[in-house]
Image (cartoon, grey):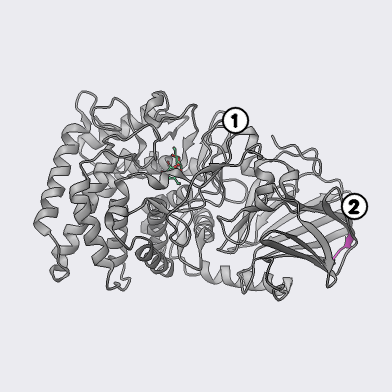
Amino acid sequence: MHKSVESPAFSASIEDYALIGDQQSAALVARDGSIDWLCLPRFDSPACFAALLGDEHNGKWRIAPKGAGPCTRRAYRTDSLVLDSEWDTPEGTLRVTDLMPQRDSAPDLVRIVEGLRGRVTVRSAIRLRFDYGSIVPWMRRAEGHRVAVAGPDAVWLRSEPAVHTWGEDFCTHSEFTVGEGEKVAFVLTWHPSHQPRPPLVDPYESLHGSLAQWREWVSQCRYDGPFRDAVVRSLITLKALTYAPTGGIVAAPTTSLPEQLGGIRNWDYRYCWLRDSTLTLDALLSAGYHEEAADWRDWLLRAVAGDPADLQIMYGLSGERRLPEFELPWLPGFGDSVPVRIGNDAAKQLQLDVYGEVIDSLSLARCSGLPAKPHMWQVQRALMDFLCSAWRQPDEGLWEVRGGRRHFVYSKVMAWVAADRAVRTLENEPQLGGDLAGWRAMRDEVHREVCERGYDAERNTFTQFYGSRGLDASLLLIPRVGFLPPDDPRVIGTVDAVREELGRDGFVRRYSTDVAEVDGLPGDEGTFLVCSFWLADALHRLGRTEEARALFERLVGLCNDVGLLAEEYDPASDRFLGNYPQAFSHLGLVSTALALFGDQEAG
Ligand SMILES: OC[C@H]1O[C@H](O[C@H]2O[C@H](CO)[C@@H](O)[C@H](O)[C@H]2O)[C@H](O)[C@@H](O)[C@@H]1O
């Protein structure tokens, strides 16, 4: 897949990557010790290491024993986002510890090399390539360190103690040996090139600080049931996807990891989808995390301020509205999957489900005791008033199809959810004010229409859109959102039909890609992991607990060696597909664990 001169025997698959991050950006570390993806200073900034979507000439930083391939073992330090990779070699054993400490003034990437046994020769090769692998910076020595500059970006590279370093083939190489108990720490620091160098961080203090911060955060987790390690890893991953300065939550830290190897279904996920974020937030809230909920709620209130008709389904990290989609023709793509896309045109789509998800999430936050903000209800009320007139329109649906608008059933179900939650809030707190009669009428009308036009009586199943023969995995959420009770024969029929028609090796696809004009895209894709978690949740609600647990266990078994999940999984090749790690998949794991084993929660 990846051609690599610096690690010839190794070509990384998606599941070969581990995540490190500082809640403003993130990096992917391959099993061979190479950092192949890093965007600075934010998740959505241009990458300075983009080998993930190309090769080493697009930027990467590898530290490993000289001549070695992939590491022998690797793991996160307990309850943290600090990664240890270890190599057993004929010379001895070496550990590289990778982390991105929480920022003071600038983003830092810390890599600590440590001898565990014998004396090992170590190679570091760093190829900085700014602007998504396209710009070779000037590299010079300054103040005893190395500094790379090009356009708006400057990166300092230093090691403690200083090691022998030389430039060759537009790459900065170092070679040194470490014996048992010896350490060499590298620190990479980014800053805007027009500003002076930020203060240097101490790599060992950063390591201890980072471990302490993560452990303190994990200690707040209320879940104490089965698969706790997988749940905690998912929670850490979700937290790592939050952009701390604003409270926004990205869907994934990558762009264009393909939904089909060699295909064109490659999208940029480094933005805040209201759907993905609200569901993430619900998962964090249920596990006991309130601070993130408050931060995200404040982010939302800022992002959506203005005319409710202008609500977007996604925003930038700070609430930016323009996310124009374009291609990077110089990048060959992961596994030759082109185009590589930046930005996301789905930002301009109408997706009615988002109103339901936002209003539901704000109601949940209210019920969870989050102190209400003065204009929170004003926003919900404005969204409801808009939805009362808009719900009859066709839309692009939650899967953001590019084949044109339709009357997607899940969109209407979520319009019902919006009305239902708004009605209930107003019934409990009439002083808030709102069109109670109008919202009740809408709630009833949507319900009636979905049951008439979105249900196929002949096959006893709800359908993907009005009049369609196709199915959709989002219909599995009908009992969870309370649109119909789990023992309703139409719900049972739908769960069985989705499982039968969209199932692949026990996992679930979002919908069938056979009818190409629906999603408007060529090619196929893998099974969608969050949908497979939804199936486990639905089976549990239907009382089929054994089946639900067996499926959940299989899904947890798909996590890679460091507990991470991509968006999709291909059972035929046993490979991850799609952006990685994805919030959708990890929130699915957390929510389903809580649904299945929540009675064993500690708090
Ligand atoms: O299927 C085509 C669409 O695929 C992407 O959307 C998916 O990712 C989103 C972020 O996780 C998620 O909210 C959505 O439900 C998924 O379908 C892509 O972002 C779209 O541009 C594309 O049209």
Task: For marks 1 and 2, give the one nearer the viewer.
Answer: 1
Drawn side of residue 118 relative to residue 300, left or right = right
* Discs 1, 2 touching: Cβ within 8 Å: no
Is 233 colored magenta in this rendering? no
Name the amino acid type tagged 2: Glu
User: Which residue occupies the foreground of this view, 82 or 148?
Assistant: 148
Mark 1 is surrounded, within 10 Å at the Cα level, by few (under 14), some (14 to 19) or many (20 or more) other residues, namely some
Q: Nearer the viewer, residue 59 or 498?
A: 59
Q: Residue at x 33, y 45 (%)?
A: 351
Which x, y percent locates residue 15?
62, 43
Label at residue 328? none
Residue 263 found in image quarter: top right
The secondary structure making up most of the magenta span is strand
- Residue 582: in sight, yes or no? yes
Q: Where is residue 255 in the image (x, y as percent from the top left)?
A: 56, 46
Taking 87 as reference, is 374 above or below it? Answer: below
Looking at the image, tell me whether mark 1 or mark 2 is earlier in sequence order: 2
Question: Residue placed at 81% from the left, 59% from the top?
Answer: 139
Q: What residue type is labelled 1?
A: Gly
Mark 1–mark 2 Cα distance, whole angstroms, equals 40 Å
Q: How many numbered marks are there?
A: 2
Q: Is mark 2 on a helix, strand or loop?
A: loop
Q: Give the range drawn in magenta.
A: 177-181
The label on residue 262 is: 1
How many C-alpha atoms fall within 10 Å of the one at disc 2: few (<14), some, or many (≥20)? few
Query: At 76% from the left edge and 55% from the top edge, which residue is drawn?
Result: 137
| Quarter placement of the C terminus | bottom left
Image-based side of 122 in relation to 30, left or right: right
Q: In which quarter of the image is ligand 1?
A: top left
Q: Name the residue under label 2.
A: 91
